[in-house]
Image (cartoon, rainbow, N blue to C red):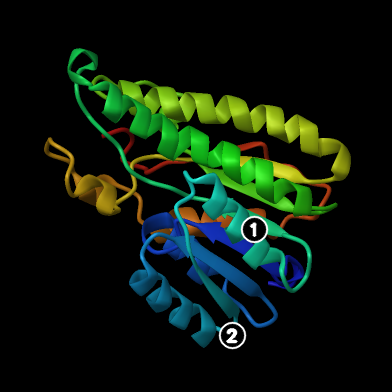
């Protein structure tokens, strides 16, 4: 816990639900200030209350991370007190499933915007406030390394995000900022509620499982870099 507390200024996107929410609760501790970002103020307030009960100070920051002005404002809120970001966890969800011949351009562009453009904007505006020993964690997916039929838009966006993150990692390396991609297997979140198909959710990870892996990254000494971490279920692929 000592090393987690050393990362005192924390920004978590997608913090209102799923992996982002679980990560906020896993990292909440006395001495930590957390900025929690998502679109739903109501859900963010619930998470913030739980984090405060664990001793963390919280800032609720409604934000659409696909809009540059929103991201600028989010970073300003996060850095207002300390002028820095020690730990940034970018976790956004949402998938669209269909054969490639049936994907509209609008759905394609939405997937790219949510999974790739949001990461670009977060990296562009937040990383200038990260310093030696800082940690940037992007919650990707096993779909960033594997491919699945009917998931072409999602896979393409996630593959692209991993490429972007790799380049950012090399840009930040001279400044002592660590960059990690976490690749969870299927995780039982609300993402699956509206997706077509029959999914064995009993064989999925829980958000807290992934959050525990992210919390473990924060415990490493500042010179240790885990560039990519795949988190799977013992049951294997769905």
Q: Earlier in the sequence, mark 1 or mark 2?
A: 2
At which x and y percent is residue 143?
40, 29
Question: Which numbered circle lies on residue 32?
Answer: none
The crowd level at tag 1 (other Cα within 10 Å; few <14, some 14-19, many 20+) is many
At which x and y percent is residue 163?
59, 25
At which x and y percent is residue 224?
78, 46
**Left or right for 175, reference 198:** right
Q: Residue at x 68, y 72 (%)?
A: 1
Q: Is residue 107 depicted above or below 46 in this figure?
A: above
**Would residue 216 be seen by someone viewing this image from the given angle?**
no
Q: Nearer the viewer, mark 1 or mark 2?
A: 1
When asked about the image quadrant of residue 17, the answer is bottom left
**Mark 1 and mark 2: Cα distance apart in space:** 23 Å
Query: As rendered, which of 3 and 21 lies closer to the eye?
Result: 21
- The C terminus: image quadrant: top left
When asked about the image quadrant of residue 172, the answer is top right
At which x and y percent is residue 230?
51, 38
Query: Residue at label 1?
Result: 75
Query: Residue at label 2?
Result: 55
Name, please, the residue furthest toward the top. 101
Judging from the image, what secondary structure is the residue with disc 2 in? loop
The crowd level at tag 2 (other Cα within 10 Å; few <14, some 14-19, many 20+) is some
Q: Is residue 50 depicted above or below 4 in this figure?
A: below
Q: Is residue 205 depicted above or below 153 in this figure?
A: below
1 and 2 marks in contact (CB < 8 Å): no
Q: Residue at x 32, y 43 (%)?
A: 94
**Left or right for 22, reference 162:** left
Judging from the image, what secondary structure is the residue with disc 1 in? helix
């Amino acid at each position: 816990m000592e090393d987690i507390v050393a990362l005192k200024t924390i920004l978590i996107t997608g913090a209102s639900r799923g992996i982002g929410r679980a990560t906020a609760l896993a990292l909440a501790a006395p001495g930590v200030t957390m900025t929690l970002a998502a679109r739903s103020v109501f859900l963010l307030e619930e998470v913030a209350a739980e984090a405060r009960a664990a001793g963390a100070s919280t800032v609720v920051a409604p934000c659409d991370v696909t809009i540059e002005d929103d991201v600028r404002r989010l970073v300003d809120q996060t850095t207002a007190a300390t002028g820095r970001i020690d730990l940034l966890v970018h976790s956004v969800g949402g998938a669209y499933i269909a054969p490639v011949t049936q994907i509209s351009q609008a759905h394609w562009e939405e997937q790219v915007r949510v999974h790739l453009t949001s990461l670009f904007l977060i990296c562009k505006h937040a990383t200038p406030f990260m310093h030696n020993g800082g940690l940037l964690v992007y919650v990707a997916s096993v779909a960033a390394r594997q491919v699945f039929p009917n998931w072409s838009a999602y896979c393409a966006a996630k593959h692209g995000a991993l490429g972007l993150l790799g380049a950012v990692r090399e840009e930040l390396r001279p400044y002592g900022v660590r960059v990690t991609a976490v690749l969870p297997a299927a995780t039982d979140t609300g993402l699956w509620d509206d997706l077509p198909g029959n999914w064995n959710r009993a064989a999925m990870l829980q958000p807290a499982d992934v959050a525990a892996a992210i919390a473990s990254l924060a415990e490493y000494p500042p010179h240790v870099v885990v560039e990519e971490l795949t988190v799977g279920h013992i049951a294997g692929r769905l």
